[in-house]
Image: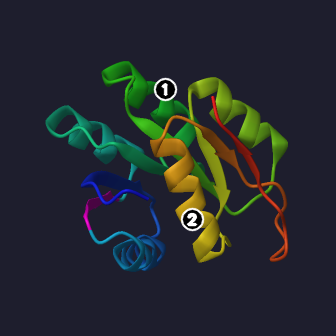
Amino acid sequence: MQQRNIHILIVDDNKFYRQALVLTLRRLFQYCKIDETCSAKESLCYIHQEIPDLVFMDIKMPEMDGITATRKVLEINDSIKIIALSMYDNSKYKNDMILAGAKGFLLKNFETNELREAIETVIHGGKYFSAKPSRNSSSKRWKM
């Protein structure tokens, strides 16, 4: 990936998962700003103040799910790219997130190279969806 300063927001109610994702992103991308929020509602307040390039949005969160939050984020600014995060390989979640406007879907058990590929694909205008939950899975990448 061309080293440009990208701004990433992680939205996940699990603090341990957020911290692990921050550490992984810092290893992968030297030039990026990474912020995090612990709820969908908090992310909406954040996005009224700052506009990230990319949002990692957990789907299942208390108070407001990631599907609803994705719609609301894109109402605020439709140039924000969103990649859904889920523990579950569920076609309904994928379809609902796509309809809400997400450009990607990653299972939380992703490999580091898949994370990099998903970010590069989505930042450059494509769509990226994990194909299978297994460790040896292939992924589907689309350039739009």
Q: Is residue 92 left or right of residue 10?
A: right
Q: Is residue 95 magenta?
A: no
Q: Nearer the viewer, residue 114 or 74?
A: 114
Kind of residue indicated by mark 1:
Arg
Q: In which quadrant is the N terminus drawn? A: bottom left
The image quadrant of residue 126 is: top right
Looking at the image, which residue is at 36% across and 69% down? 29
Mark 2 neighbour density, 10 Å: few (under 14) some (14–19) many (20 or more): many
Return the residue at label 1. Answer: 71
* Label 2 SS: helix
Looking at the picture, how far across and down is residue 97, in whole percent? 64, 35
Looking at the image, which residue is at 29% across and 52% down? 6
Q: How is the image coloured?
A: rainbow
Tell me the chief SS of the magenta region: strand
Do we see residue 20 in this rendering? yes
Vertical placement of 21 versus 56: above or below? below
Kind of residue indicated by mark 2:
Leu
Q: Is residue 32 left or right of residue 17?
A: left
Mark 1 neighbour density, 10 Å: few (under 14) some (14–19) many (20 or more): some
Q: Which residue is situated farthest in the top direction here? A: 75
The image quadrant of residue 46 is: top left
Looking at the image, which residue is at 29% across and 43% down? 52
Q: How many marks?
A: 2
Do we see residue 65 in this rendering? no
* Label 1 SS: helix
Q: What range is drawn magenta here?
A: 31-37
Q: Nearer the viewer, residue 26 or 40?
A: 26
Looking at the picture, how far across and down is residue 108, in whole percent? 64, 67
Return the residue at label 2. Answer: 115
